[in-house]
Amino acid sequence: MTVKLYQFCISHYCEKVRWALDYKAINYDTVNLLPGQHVKSIKKLTRAESSVPVLDHDGQVIQGSAQILDYLEQAFPERPLTPENPALREQILSWETKLDELAGPAIRTWVYHYFLQRPKVVIPLLAAGTPFYNRFMLSLAFSRVDEIMRNWMKINQKTADAAQQTLETLITELEAIYRQQPYLVGEQFSRADLAAGALLAPLFQPPQYPVPWPKPAKIPKPVQAWLQNWQPKLEPIAKLYQQHR
Ligand SMILES: N[C@@H](CCC(=O)N[C@@H](CS)C(=O)NCC(=O)O)C(=O)O
């Protein structure tokens, strides 16, 4: 049996899948791709979109973090992340969807808006897990990389400000829940908690996450200031990550 995960190390959607695979103790190999160069190989594999994560399990190809989690639950039912109880299940899946659709894009927009202004900091994150020469390649082509990423994800000051608002609302909501109960829904760790921990991880930069996080002093100033204010609210999510990752 072979399980291969096509991914960007920096992608928080890929972190959802890495976490689910590790949680279920499934052996897997990663294929680390460089953003931009991934399009050709992913489209060839999926014959559809170019986004990662993509999982290949003995030739069965699944794209999208939620779809991959669904697949893993069915193919590897040990250590379930989704309960049988229909009411709990529905709440958990709806949290996951909300996190995938709101938290994922908001963090990406907000963080990249500031990090793309610091090529030396962002390049090692984008190229993490790929051959060393990719860092030089990205440095040489950086203005184009910046332009493509900003166009593709619609990143500018206005969208970054809106993304910050979205994040603040969501983090406030999550913190209020986690201060009262250990899990988002029900009595057990589930894929809703996994989605929250993985998608928000770039905001608390856990050491298990396979990228070279920048030293705090290298983080762009507006992000540093925000993190300092919001770190206490992120604490329960960081703790959950440390306990279950
Ligand atoms: N909803 C998707 C989102 C995946 C996604 O946005 N992936 C980004 C990286 S974080 C990506 O692959 N972007 C490049 C592309 O779409 O070609 C999921 O849950 O997997």
Image: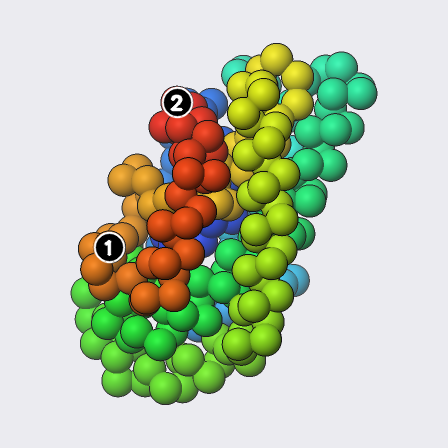
Whether residue 41 appears in this view of the structure is: no
- Give the position of the C terminus as an image quadrant: top left
The label on residue 88 is none
How far from the left and from the top, in percent, is residue 202?
40, 50
Residue 216 occupies which quadrant of the picture? bottom left
The percent position of residue 209, horizontal first and vertical second, equals 33, 43
Q: Which residue is the site of mark 2? A: 243
State which tag comes first along the sequence, 2 or 1.
Answer: 1
Residue at the spot x=48%, y=75% of the render?
149
**Can you tell which quarter of the image residue 159 is in?**
bottom right
Determine contact: label 2, label 1, CB under 8 Å. no
Residue 216: numbered disc: 1
Q: What's the residue type where badge 2 is placed?
A: Gln
Q: Give amino acid for label 1.
A: Pro
Foreground: 103 or 19? 103
User: Residue at the location (56% across, 43% down)?
Assistant: 171
Question: How packed is label 2: few (under 14 Cα within 10 Å), some, or many (20 or more)?
Answer: few
- Compared with residue 92, is residue 47 higher up or lower down, i.e. above or below? below
Q: CA distance from mark 2 to mark 1?
A: 23 Å
Tell whether 59 sits left or right of 89.
Answer: left
**Residue 231's x, y, as percent?**
40, 43
What element does badge 1 sit on? helix
Write the residue at 38% across / 65% down. 222
Residue positioned 58% across, 41% down in the render: 172
The N terminus lies in which quarter of the figure?
A: top left
**Other residues around mark 1 within 10 Å, as few (<14) / some (14–19) / many (≥20):** few
Give percent across and percent down for residue 20. 49, 31
User: Image check: 137 left or right of 200?
Assistant: left
CB of mark 2 near ligand 1 (< 8 Å)? no
Q: Quick one: 111 or 77, which is closer to the camera?
A: 111
Q: Which of the 4 quarters of the picture holds residue 67?
A: top right
In the displayed orientation, state which residue is furthest to the front: 229
